[in-house]
Image: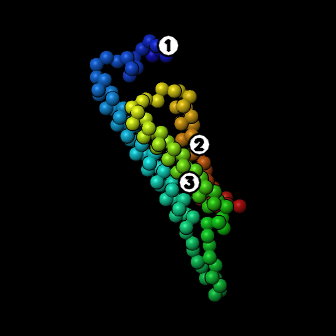
């Protein structure tokens, strides 16, 4: 396949264009659902961590533990908030694309979206791994 305009691409295939449009719409709706799901789950995780309080009694003294006592939990809340915000922005982009009916043609924009997805995933997993390993300095 050549990228010089010679070859087969969805734009120059004759025949089942309605089938291609249907598949494209299903892919877009699936992306929108996944982005909304990530946004909701990241937001729920941030809220649950931020609002959780545990009370322990040690020698008749009650100690109240909050998420602010550990830097790793604070960072986890911040990263989950950033992930939720990024997913919300991408979900809005998906909705606008669905309403306008446009396909993402810009390669730099596609790479930027891919890079943003990877960075968000990397930092979320890195902070979670640090918390699990007890690296909460």
Mark 3 and 2 residues: CB-CB less than 8 Å, in contact?
Answer: no
Residue 133 in view in this figure? no
Quadrant of the image for the N terminus? top left
Residue beneath the point at 43% across and 29% down: 103
Q: Name the residue carrying label 3.
A: 80
Question: Which of 117 and 127 lies nearest the eye of the viewer?
Answer: 117
Q: Name the residue carrying label 2.
A: 119
Residue beneath the point at 59% across and 58% down: 77
Q: Residue furthest front?
A: 100
Q: Is residue 3 above or below residue 107?
A: above
Q: Is residue 118 above or below residue 63?
A: above
Q: Residue 27 placed where, x, y %?
A: 38, 36
Q: Residue 52 placed where, x, y %?
A: 55, 69
The tally of labels here is 3
| Cα distance in 3D space between marks 3 and 2 | 12 Å
The chosen color scheme is rainbow
| Cα distance in 3D space between marks 3 and 1 | 42 Å
The dot on residue 4 is 1
Question: How crowded is the residue under tag 1: few (<14 C-alpha within 10 Å), some, or many (20+)?
Answer: few
Question: How crowded is the residue under tag 2: few (<14 C-alpha within 10 Å), some, or many (20+)?
Answer: few
């Amino acid at each position: 396949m050549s990228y010089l305009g010679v070859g087969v691409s969805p734009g120059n295939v004759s025949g089942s264009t309605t089938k291609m449009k249907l598949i494209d719409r299903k892919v877009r709706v699936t992306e929108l659902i996944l982005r909304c799901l990530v946004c909701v789950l990241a937001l729920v995780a941030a809220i649950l961590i931020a609002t959780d309080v545990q009370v322990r009694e040690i020698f008749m003294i009650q100690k109240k533990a909050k998420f602010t006592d550990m830097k790793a939990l604070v960072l986890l809340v911040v990263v989950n908030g950033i992930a939720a915000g990024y997913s919300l922005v991408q979900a809005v982009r998906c909705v606008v694309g669905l309403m306008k009916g446009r396909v993402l043609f810009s390669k730099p924009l596609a790479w930027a979206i891919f890079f943003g997805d990877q960075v968000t995933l990397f930092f979320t997993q890195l902070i979670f791994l640090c918390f699990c390993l007890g690296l909460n300095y």
